[in-house]
Image: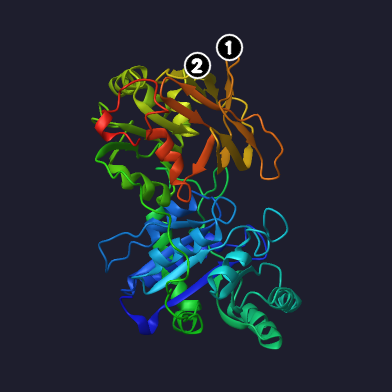
Amino acid sequence: MSNQSIFSQFLLAAPASGSGKTTLTLGLLRALANRGLRVQPFKCGPDYIDTRHHQTAASGEAHSGVPPSINLDLFMSSPEHVVDSYQRYASGADVAITEGVMGLFDGADRMQGSSASIAELLDIPVVLVVNAKAMAYSVAPLLYGFKHFYTGINLVGAIFNNVGSASHYRFLADACADVGVEPLGYLPSNPRFTIPSRHLGLHISAETDYEQIIQAIAEELPKTINLDRLLAVTQRPNPSPQSYTPPPQPSAQSNLRISVARDEAFTFTYEQNLDVLARWGRVTFFSPLHDKELPETDFLYLPGGYPELYAQQLSENIAMRTSIGDYCQAGGLTYAECGGLMYLSQSIQTESVQRNNSTAWPMVGVLNITTSMLSPKLTLGYRIVDWDGMTLKGHEFHYSTQQEPMLQTSIASVTNAKGVPVNTKLYRTHNTVASYVHLYWGDKPEFIQHLLSSSFRTDNHIKPELAIQ
């Protein structure tokens, strides 16, 4: 640790979604980073939007490095993997802040995989974020219930959101005192703290000045929240090695050239997935929006994001579309998910507000499907993918729909978290594999190993000496 004496770690949870967890998390990350502390953010669950905001907020004035925010998910990965991820990324930090998901005890099945189960697994204290709008002393039984409902967690304090005044907060603090939960402060109602939502969670858009909003929260937050006390009551022993042994490294370390799309249109990646890719070679990021051609590549990864927001720019970058199309048609190894699938489709159809009609923007055209935003329909949930003897887990989240000119067969079976089949497919064209599912392979490196294997490929596009046999 950079400073063992002040290492604090806690999970920010709430009774329900919409209580202000993300707003408070972003403000705390920036306020503490501005103090000169090294803050490491984590996010419970599969969310790949909040983690991007975390990374922005954690970049304080005192440190040039920007720590990535790390997902901790007990459905997509094993408890041992979650512990290992937390220990690896929290080491070297002064403060580790984990943002919960939904309500504290909300899991895929009762509290299974919930924020509470992660707090228990990692043995870190919980700070409850309560939306106190239109509530005063009646918060007492709510706090009492959350503190005593499950003895496996340690609820050490509460922070209140949407508090109308200092006198309002005194009622809330009295309630805390009477049930044995320490009041740590509050965040007043303020329209400057509002970050627009898009789809699920907080959206990422060039139209919103996130930096200004995050800084505004960070500047106001110390006026009403006792940061020193928050750090004091959440001090815990540094993460220490457990009996868990991390997954073995691949037997054949190679120098594959791995290209990953990353720009405004492609933002949804799990950091642990990138860690696995780096085991096999040099990871290079490129922009389908701004660059003119694909870098020299042995393996192309097109993650999810918001290609529908940038459909015109992506379509008009014909040089890049051609470069990626030629690579895929020639048998180049490619994995695409959600937004990446949309980009590899024949077209993305979007509304044209100015012309009051719709436009089908041509895309790369490798996949024989089209995608559309005209009749948006939320598809959301955990997914289990059985393919080539592997069981993989991931998360599906999109509003776009797809059409197949000719019915195609999925190369894998896909179910929801309870094992019920869903309509989601895993497509394969040449050596291109694509799906709407955001797979998590941080705990399943054998997935990447399989893609790179000579038995998977249908040609010799990857040099034989680089392939994993």
The disc labelled 2 sits on which kind of residue? Asn
The disc labelled 1 sits on which kind of residue? Met
Q: Can you say whether 13 is above or below 363 in the image?
A: below
Which one is in front, 159 or 118?
Answer: 118
The location of residue 210, given as percent across then percent down, is: 41, 53
Q: Can you say whether 207 is above or below 36 in the image?
A: above
The residue that disc 1 covers is 406
Which label sits on residue 369?
none
Quarter of image, res 329: top left
Quarter of image, res 285: top left
Question: At x 27% / y 34%, what residue is drawn?
Answer: 466
Q: Can you say whether 108 is above or below 166 in the image?
A: above
Q: CA distance from mark 1 to mark 2?
A: 8 Å
Horizontal placement of 363 versus 412: left or right?
A: left
Question: At x 47% / y 84%, what residue is drawn?
Answer: 232
Which one is in front, 469 or 417?
Answer: 469
Q: Secondary structure at mark 1?
A: loop
Q: Secondary structure at mark 2?
A: loop
The residue that disc 2 covers is 368
The location of residue 259, given as percent across then percent down, is: 31, 36
Question: At x 42% / y 17%, what residue is drawn?
Answer: 365
Quarter of image, res 310: top left
The location of residue 113, given as percent across then percent down, is: 63, 58
